[in-house]
Every structure is written in structure tokens, then in C-alpha cells.
Image (tube, coloured by chain):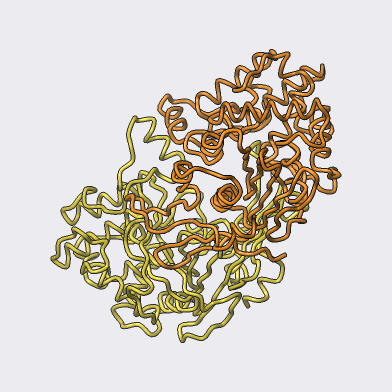
Chain colours: A yellow, B orange
Amino acid sequence: MSDPVLVEVTRGSIVESRHRGAIAVVDAGGRVRAAVGDVGQAVFPRSAVKALQALPLVESGAADRYGFGNAELALACASHSGEPRHVATATRMLTAAGRSAADLACGVSWPANREAANALARAGEMPSALHDNCSGKHSGFICLACHMGVDPSGYVKPDHPVQRTVTAALAEMTDTDLGDHNRGVDGCSIPTYAVPLDKLALAFARFVTGEGLSADRARAAARLRAACTAEPAMVAGAGRFATHALSLFGARLFVKGGAEGVYCGGFPELGLGVALKCDDGASRAAETLMAAVIAALVPMSAAERADFADWLTPPVMTRAGVRIGEVRAVAGLAESLR
Amino acid sequence: MSDPVLVEVTRGSIVESRHRGAIAVVDAGGRVRAAVGDVGQAVFPRSAVKALQALPLVESGAADRYGFGNAELALACASHSGEPRHVATATRMLTAAGRSAADLACGVSWPANREAANALARAGEMPSALHDNCSGKHSGFICLACHMGVDPSGYVKPDHPVQRTVTAALAEMTDTDLGDHNRGVDGCSIPTYAVPLDKLALAFARFVTGEGLSADRARAAARLRAACTAEPAMVAGAGRFATHALSLFGARLFVKGGAEGVYCGGFPELGLGVALKCDDGASRAAETLMAAVIAALVPMSAAERADFADWLTPPVMTRAGVRIGEVRAVAGLAESLR
């Protein structure tokens, strides 16, 4: 495997670091519309498929039963920063099903948001599983279990009814056989399955267009997407790439990242899905590549382009606040994507 | 440039991410004893050369004049975690020269050490430049200026007498012409110069053996190295790789990392220096490679090997504390290094 260098990190006039990767752009009919690097490689999508994993929550009727609005559904699709609004929304989801943070199996971590972490420390408190970036997804899983009438206990295990249901949806969306042979364990203890990059892009083309999906699934996909568009701050958090892109471009796109350099998304008006992986797992490169994909494919106004500039070439700064380099996609990438 | 894959990150039975890089092992006579990847590539060593940048502090007599012991000298070579002992030692260095944190130009950052950061937040305080990982090096620069009888103001600029002196030492140690053509700005605002990897390894072979150096410089190098061996917790901090390696192997090695995937070091008994760069800038890969270099070159007891195991193959964990993968050097790397 030798994917091309797609992202450069500069310092002064010198390229200091380089990231390789692959990008698949696929339509809902499964046609590969652009391919950079090895798009047949199987990658763990990690959190990039949370929106697909949330489909059963809506399709089953659980979301309606527990009265979930946009905030709750967006949080079910989120890798959030542990801000107070995220914690409050996850709590509300669990409470609606008569459950609590004690049922969460995602593990405990400090909020990624510095201000939120400092506020906790200042109050002499420690974080709980509610602060973990996956608490919304896990709250959705617990609610799904309750709605299905099964014990949520063990809901992270591959053979639990919740994971069976979620995995079936993921297998259908990606046209990929998911099982022991391609299963790993995600950081939040649920299964993650290695899926070819072009199949992940296909899944997101379907997700954003509804093409090739049952009417129920297409409705569930549209509802989750509308929730993320309406509540972009729930999907990630203050200062984060996904939140900024969803805020800026609204219903023109859906994007969601995962750990280890994965980013997925789709463009409803173009009928396209995209999936990318940085070989080395770097988030900075994955975000810069996703920004480059958006800039190459989505028509945007001059004002939008200006507002998006810092995500296309994120600055490298001194700690005294001076810009001394940048992260940038390699020259010619846009042409390869069109 | 196409360096080989040197580090793999696994999840279950699948390799999830891959890091490429290059490693140079060179003796004090400049002979390349092992080369993996492109060892002629110029890389910004960043903080990996702090010990070389500290040579003038000792050679000039400034360290003696201000009464510096092992703790102060180790901190001058450090990328520390902002723990209370680090802050106290930097403060002591500045006070000895009649200066204060107000003179530091490194910028302000939160301590990398979570406990230290939480303690600050809990006290309702904000970090100062003393908490920045480079505050020891910068305190050394300020003391050098005071000892030279020049105004410390502007000490981070390339044409300030302090940087001229430090750059001259670095150029001599690396046998490399350093100037406008290969200069960038480091995260702490001082100049950083791109140096070929094999020349960085040469510099550290000289640093740990004293060979090819003036008597004064060899003494200064030995003193800095002894300080880092005596105070390994000053060089990085609790739970950090450099601190663990210096504690475990004592005078048998010197190691120091830099940002963007650089690690340098040397083995006095073997008469060798080493410099490595991960193309993508990942610290996890640089540390794992340095651990692999140590394991390949340094004779160690079974107890030492056991104590070092988690650095050779750092675990990938769920946030619930289960090991589900590992970071590891590729098979056969040890053979290429011997």
C-alpha cells in the first residue's frame, strides 16, 4: 500500500511533515466518481459512521417514543466536546428512557473542550461517562434497547440485540459483510468494522440522497441529517471543524469525522458521498482533506470561501500567536476530485 | 521522498494506521552505521536539540555564575510537563539572574500534565509562560544574555547575541551551515534550523562521547548529560518516555524528542548518535521508534526489558481500560539498525 502524499505541513518555506491518504467520492448508484489513493482499502470508520449507527434509533420508533428533537438526534450522531449542553442533552436522553449515566459503558474522559474541563476542575469535580465524546451515541443505544424491550446491560457487545441491529443497518448501508473477520473494538468499547473506503462513500451517498433505501430508512436518514444541520454545535462543539462546516453550509452537506484520520460525508445536491482516510491517523490532515473536498465540490460564495479559509489552510502558530506555517492539501488535489 | 513504513498501529488483528520515517545511526567520526529511509533529508529538530542549545549556558560560565545544579541544567534541556517542580526550577533560574517570568518570550500554555493543569484550574488560576514546556530553555537563554552583559530583550530573534551564540554551537556540532536558507520559527518563537538527519545523529554522537569537541565543549556536554541522568523527571515529566528511558538506562544513553515526530539521542558506551523523523510528525511513532532503537542497540537485563516493554509496544486502549491494539515497530527493523 502506498497512498500519495495529500497534505503538507509547512514551517517557513520548508515542508516539515507530510500526510498520505486516500479519498473516495462515490454516487448513490455505487459509481466511483473520484478516487485518490487506494479506495478499496478496508478502514475502521470509527466515529465517522455514528449517523449510520443512529438510523435504528429513528427507524425503530425509539426517538419518537422518547420525544427526541434535533438536539438529541444530533447528539446521537456526535463526537462532542463534553460541553455543558452536551452533558445536559445526554442526561435528558437517558432520563427519557428511565436510565442514567450509570448505564453508559463508553468509559470516562475529560471534556475535549478546555473551558469545560477547567470548569469541572475548578468545581473540584471529576468527569463522568456523560463527558465522554461518545455519550450521545451510547445514550441512543441504551434508549434503543429500552424501546426494544431488552436489558441494556452489555449493549456494547457484538451479540447484544442493539449491536446486532446497528451492525445490520451498517452492513446494508455499506453493502459490506460485517463479522468476526473485520471487527475491532472502538475506543468506546463498541464494535467497529473495517469497511472499504469506496463502500463508506457509497453509504454516505445513500444517506444524504435516500436513493436505494427503503422509505423508512430514507426518512430516518433525512431526519438525522436535518437534526445535525439544525444543531451543528451538538455534533462536535465550539471551534470544531464539523460544527463549523455544518453551520456554514447547512443542508448542502453532511460531514462527520472519526478517530485515526477518517472523515466521511455527503453532498445531497450533488448526489455524492465521500470517505477519506489518512494513513497515519492524523486528525489535522483528515480535516484539511475534508475541507479540500468541500472546496472542490461545493459551489460557495466569496463570503463563504473567506469564512472557510482557515479550515482549508489551518495556520501553524507560535505559542505567542504568530503564524509561521500552515497545513495544506497538495497542489492539484482539487482537480483530482472533480 | 518515500521513506518506508516503520510503525504500525493495530486494532484487533488489523493494522489501522501506518507511520513512515527515517533513522540515522552515526558514530562520532561521521560514519553512518545504520540508515533507514532518507537520512540525508533536512529536518527541523525542534526541541530534540535543546541539550545542544544549552551548551553555551555551561561553556560561557553562566551556569556556574548563577549556581545551577543538575535540576536547572536538566530543565534547560527539557520539554517539561509544567509540573510544580518544573515551574519552581525555572523561577529559580530566572531569579538567580535577577530576572522574572515577565522576560520569558516562549508564550503561555497549559501544563501538558493533566494533574498540574487541573490543580491550576482548581485554584482559579491561569497558566503563565513558566508552565510552557520550553520555559527552562528560555530561562537558560535569559541567564546567558545576563552573563554576556547584553539586554535579554529580543533574545528569541536570530540576530540577538544569545541566538548567534547558540546557533554557532549548533552549526559546529552538526557540521551544517545554518542561516536564512534553512531557518524556520519554532513554536516557542526561537529559530529552528533544518539539518540533515545524519548530521543530527553525528552531533549527538559527539555530544555523548566528547569526541571531536574542544575540551571545554566536551566538559559542558558531559555535565549536561550527567544533569539529565541525575534529574530525568526534569527533562520531561511524570509518565513521559524520555523521563522513563533516562531513569531506566541512566548514563547508558541520552534521549530527547522534538515536535513533529523527531527524536534524537546517543549511546556513550557504543559511541553512537541517533536521529529519527516520522514523516507525518507523530509523537507516538517517534517514541516507539526511539524505543525500538534502544532495544536494538543497548544491552539490557530481562528486568529492564520487562520495564521497557510498554514503550516498545505501547498499548491502544479503550476508555474503559481494555487493551485492544498496539503501536509497534515493523518486523525486521531491529536487524536494519544493528
**Along the viewing direction, whichever of A176 and B48 lies nearer the viewer:** B48
Q: Residue furthest left?
A: A149
The image quarter containing residue B50 is top right
Residue B52 % position (x, y)? 73, 35
In which quadrant is the N terminus of chain A drawn? bottom right
Residue at image location 70% in from the left, 29% down from the top = B222
The answer to whether residue B124 is above or below residue A79 is above
Residue B189: x and y, percent? 71, 37
> Is there any visible trace of residue A219 in the rendered image?
yes
Measured as percent of width and height from the top left, residue B109 is found at: 56, 34
Q: Nearer the viewer, residue A236 or B67?
A: B67
Quarter-of-image position of residue A217: bottom left
For the residue pair A89 and A317, the one nearer the viewer reads as A317
**Percent position (x, y) of residue B74?**
62, 27
Instruction: Classify residue A235 as left or right of residue A59.
Output: right
Task: State the residue at coordinates (62%, 38%).
Answer: B253
Q: Is residue A313 visible?
A: no
Give the number of marks. Answer: 0
Q: Residue at x 32, y 56 (%)?
A: A136
Q: Is residue B89 left or right of residue B315?
A: right
Place residue B325 in its image quadrant: bottom left
- Which quarter of the rendering shows the C terminus of chain A? bottom right
Q: Is residue B104 above or below residue A93?
A: above
- Residue placed at 71% from the left, 19% from the top? B63
Is residue B159 found left or right of A57 in the rendered image? right
